[in-house]
Amino acid sequence: MADFGPMVLRVCRAVVGPDEAEDAWSETFLAALKAYPELDEGANVEAWLVTIAHRKAIDATRAAARRPVAAGPLPERPSRTGRPEDWDGDLWAALAALPAKQRAAVAYHYLTGLPYAQIAEITGGSTDAARRAAADGIKTLRATYLARTTEGTYLARTTEGTEGEGR
Amino acid sequence: MMATMEPEARDLFGSLPEQDEQAAARLHARLAAAAAADGILDVAYRTVDTPLGTLLLAATEQGLVRVAYPGQGHDAALAQLAELVSPRILNAPGRLDGAARQLDEYFSHHRRAFDLPLDLRLSRGFRRTVLTHLLQIPYGATESYTQVAAAAGHPRAVRAAGSACATNPVPIVVPCHRVVRSDGSPGGYAGGPDAKRSLLTLEAA
């Protein structure tokens, strides 16, 4: 199960954002640890973890909606806490602007490689709807986020903000 | 399984690190603490460096359940614990701080007896009886397999006493290294014959 920690963290960061991601990750793995002995042998652990993470993300979003925080425009800051592991704030700004279904479909498909049929089972709705949500999400991100890279603002930030992520 | 990294996704999520060591360490510690608080950290483990190599230590809520030598394979030991005890296993050093410290003291000649709660559930029946007896062999002393068999109530079960020692799940702490052949030669050992000789030499010093 520990093998999937980094993958689930990426998913949480992409779906609930940097502030809530670690809470969502912790709740996901605590719930998974509780339920693990009942998991069928041979079950797809990755899909199972994403399913739990998805539920935790919904909980987190609901909780955040109830919290009386000033919901102003997303700040244009590369990092909210100054921790070196924090990732590009522009990406979260762009992801946060997507409808939740599209954000989930994009994250689950592109960060875990789960097929759309499985994503549909997790998010509800049909396989086609999941595929469409991911395509629409990508289309929007191409216009909002990826367009920035050509302007240089995002590139400048990656060089200062996320070194050491070479692979 | 790695994500299908189409060029588009690489551009898109490139700034989202695939590995984030600091966050991973922070989250792992947090999970271990939360699991322990919820009573679902069934097996905690850590490693400890000793003159005999890196040992794996594992403990249930009852006590120390496993000590594994490098040669026994730490992954194999963890897999066995997952199968026989519980799959809820986390690298959570806290529960094993006492065991690690006492082993450290033992190897530096500052401790002659371990004072640790033990969980001998990996050993059953006669084997368990043998292990319980081994705990009474004092530091620096040895017994033969024949003596151990007799002390465990089955004088003729010498071979079974040998296999109880060979399958001791908590070597060093349950001192199966203090059981030697009747002719005085060390005999086999889970950590290898050299490890057994080292322990006997350590205790003789």
Image (cartoon, coloured by chain):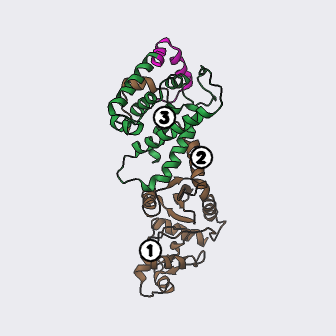
Chain colours: A green, B brown
The C terminus of chain A is located in which quarter?
Answer: top left
Q: Which residue is mark 3?
A: A10
Whether A150 is among the magenta residues is yes
Please check whether the numbered discs 3 and 2 fall on a single chain.
no
Q: Against A4, is B121 above or below?
A: below
Which mark's residue is nearer the viewer, 1 or 3?
Answer: 3
Q: Which residue is mark 1?
A: B187
**Distance from the alpha carbon under mark 3 to that under mark 2:** 17 Å
Specify whether A136 is left or right of A96: left
Q: What is the chief secondary structure element of the magenta stretch?
A: helix
Give the magenta part as a residue range. Answer: A144-167
**Chain under numbered label 1:** B
* Residue A167 in sight: no
Amino acid type of the residue that numbered disc 2 sits on in the rendered structure? Arg
Amino acid type of the residue that numbered disc 1 sits on in the rendered structure? Gly
Mark 2: secondary structure:
helix
Judge the density around disc 3: few (<14), some (14-19), many (≥20) Cα neighbours within 10 Å. many
Whether A23 is among the magenta residues is no
* Residue B47 x %, y %: 54, 55
Specify whether A142 is left or right of B26: left
Q: Which residue is mark 2?
A: B30
User: Residue drawn at (63%, 33%), measured in percent from left and top?
Assistant: A67
* Residue B50 x %, y %: 56, 58
